[in-house]
Image (cartoon, helix red, strand yellow):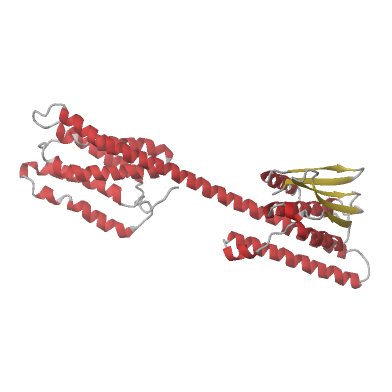
Amino acid sequence: MRTDPLTRPDRSRRWPTVTAALLLFAPAALAHPGDRGAALLLALTAALAAVVALLAWPLGRVTLATAAGAAAGASLLVDLCYPGPYRLPAFWAPFEWLALIGVLFRAVRRLPDRWAGPIGGLVGLAAVVLPLRFALRMPQGGAAGPVGGVLFSLLPVLGVGGASLYLRVLDARRERAVARARREQRLEVARGLHDFVAHEITGIVLEAQAGQLPGPETEETATLLRRLEEAGLRALDSMDEMVGALRGDQEAAGTTRRPGLADLPELVARFGTKGGPRATVDLAPGVVGLLSAEAQATAYAVVLEALTNVRRHAPQAAVVTVRVAPEPDGRAVRLTVGDTGGPATRRLRLRRRPGTGGTGLAGLAARAAAHGGTLTSGPLGPSGWEVCCTLPGR
């Protein structure tokens, strides 16, 4: 719902607005006794329009649409039924017309779509025909007076209506941009959770399962527990970084370094120390400088996801190979992660809830496409699997 200073509750504005509206009734007390009833009627319509234009809405159960419709309807009704002399409306008409212009601006810009057009049109009509209240009652005035009054009122009404409609479009664009930014932020956090925290948690679960295998406690068990601690700490660090991003911590965001191609050897070495497949990395010389920081972060995430999938689905694979090299034309970088496959033991296979997982590579494919690259995956050899990602250079 659109909000602005005139649609948010603000009690400090009520009494000044009511006081100003009541002042419009003061001249009616000075009118000729025979015209006092007509003067009070004119003051009432002007005061009603002023209150709608200035007060914050909703007021109790009364919405802006209801109040604006009432003000416009009252003005049109007085135009049709005004019983007094033609000169009397000239005092209140300017105040009422300005108030109706204010109501028109708020109605077109702030009302919901289903009400903005009808209520805005009704208020605009009331403002346009307001000069007829006295122009049609002028003796021997002819048609020039009423036509001139309507044209004089029509141009500002069209201008204000167009300006408020333009601002309404800008407001809608801004709301869509904010919603899109929030969605992208949520997706970024989801990617971070999947790419980094899920990887570490997967390792923790698998090593915890390995620690339950029967056998005497040895130095190997102590090493396993240390690796569990380190993986847990890394997961906590990743969570801290994502929480800082959600809070909009610019200082923290500026000091957080994105992982890139240069970090792949450490990632692969850490993967190899947790048991399971033997992992190797082949990083071509000079390939790090070919990709932007954002593309390198995507490449790192691809390797991380592929290694995590090996742990989940092929922990008995003999070898996992990571290769990063430029394409022959030098305009792109090709990254592959392949494993030899093999049946997973029942004890070490990660148990997962039905309906979870399977979204990592799809999300990374979208990230690669955003950089102008591609990501594919498929069988390798008799029982292996390979993930291939191509990213364009700078």
The picture places residue 344, in percent across and down from the top left corner, at: 89, 52
Hey, which quadrant is residue 288 in on the image?
Answer: bottom right
Residue 189 falls left or right of residue 28: right
Looking at the image, how many numbered discs can be counted on the residues?
Answer: 0
Residue 212: % across, % down: 87, 64
| Relative horizontal placement of residue 342, taking residue 79 as reference (left or right) | right
Using residue 258 as the reference point, say whether residue 166 is left or right of it.
left
Nearest the eye: 156 or 1: 156
Q: Which quarter of the figure has residue 114?
A: top left
> In the visual, does 87 lie left or right of 106?
left
User: Which residue is rendered at x = 74% and y = 67% of the image?
Assistant: 233
Going by the picture, which residue comes out furthest to the right? 215
Which residue is depicted at the point 21% across and 36% down?
Answer: 130
Horizontal and vertical percent for residue 330?
77, 46
In the rendering, at what x and y percent does residue 88 appear? 11, 41
Task: Kindly tell me whether residue 345 is visible in this rendering.
Answer: no
Q: Is residue 3 above or below residue 78?
A: below
